[in-house]
Image (cartoon, helix red, strand yellow):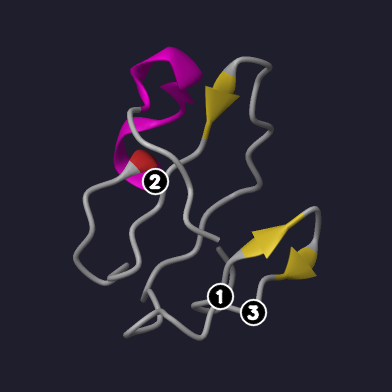
Amino acid sequence: FRDGKLFVNDQEVDEPYTTEECDWNMEPVTVRAGNVYVVGDNRAVSIDDHVFGQTSIKRVMGSPIW
C-alpha cells in the first residue's frame, strides 16, 4: 500500500469496489508459496493481513467471485 492505493508487482490495482482509501503505507511484501495476502475492502478499519501477516492457503474457505 502506497498513498492509499494497493500495488501488486509495483502496478496500481484498480479497485472500484473499495469504499475508502487506507490512510497508511507499508513496505512491499513477498508472499511465500502456499500463502495468500488478504486485505479487506474497507481498509480504513479492516483488521486483515496488513496487521497479522500472510495467511496459509489451507486456512482459506470459499471461492473467489471475480
Assess whether residue 58 is covered by the magenta stretch: yes
Residue 62 vs residue 3: left or right? left
Q: Which residue is disc 1 drawn over?
A: 5
Quarter of the picture holding the N terminus: bottom right
The image shows residue 56 at horizontal and vertical percentages of: 45, 17
The image shows residue 44 at horizontal and vertical percentages of: 26, 72
**Looking at the image, is mark 2 or mark 1 earlier in the sequence?**
1
Task: Give, as a three-letter code, the residue at label 3.
Answer: Asp
Rendered position, 16 above or below 54:
below
Residue 3: image quadrant is bottom right
Highlighted magenta segment, given as a residue range = 50-60
Residue 32 vs residue 56: left or right? right
Residue 59: image quadrant is top left
What residue do we see at 56% from left, 75% from top? 5
Quarter of the picture holding the C terminus: bottom right
The image shows residue 15 at horizontal and vertical percentages of: 54, 78
Task: Give, as a three-letter code, the residue at label 1.
Answer: Lys
Which SS class for mark 1?
loop
Assess whether residue 35 is covered by the magenta stretch: no
Q: Which residue is disc 3 drawn over?
A: 14
The image shows residue 11 at horizontal and vertical percentages of: 79, 67
